[in-house]
Amino acid sequence: MNNFNYNLEIDELIQKLNSTKYAKILLQLPDGLKPKAELIKKELETKTNCQIFIWAGSNFGACDVPLEIDKLNFDAIIHFGHSPWEK
């Protein structure tokens, strides 16, 4: 995916999603990437069997995982932030 100024490792993410049985994924982005949310969503849905939902609420960093989503039964959260986490 060459439409970004950031290395979002989309190809690696697609490979990871395709190696799981995840079906319902929440995509959480910082404000600077929210304008690209639909593009990221389409790329992931096109190349995986996942249904992607975009979190429109706040995202102030890695510690800002939305707790209220536990009732929505997502299989995983894809959280893009500013600092790398261990894989």
Image (tube, rainbow, N blue to C red):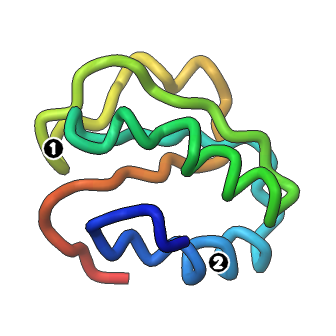
Q: In which quadrant will I find the C terminus? A: bottom left
- The outermost residue toward the front is 3
Q: Is residue 41 left or right of residue 67?
A: right
Q: Position of residue 31 (x, y in %)?
A: 22, 33
Q: Amino acid at mark 1?
A: Cys
3 or 30, nearer to the observer: 3
Left/right placement of residue 20 relative to residue 3 reads right
Q: Is residue 49 above or below residue 25?
A: below
> In this figure, which residue is indicated by the disc labeled 2?
16
Residue 54 percent coordinates (x, y): 53, 30
36 over 5 or under it: above or below: above
Location of residue 35 (image quadrant) = top left
Left-right relation of 65 to 45: left
SS at badge 2: helix
Distance of mark 2 from mark 1, alpha carbons?
A: 23 Å
Say which residue appears at 68% left-offset and 40% top-offset.
52
Residue underneath mark 1: 63
Q: Quadrant of the N terminus?
A: bottom right
Query: Residue type at mark 2?
Result: Lys
Task: Specify the farthest residue to the right.
Answer: 49
For label 2, the crowd category at 10 Å Cα-Cα, with few meaning under 14, some 14 to 19 and many 20 or more, is: few
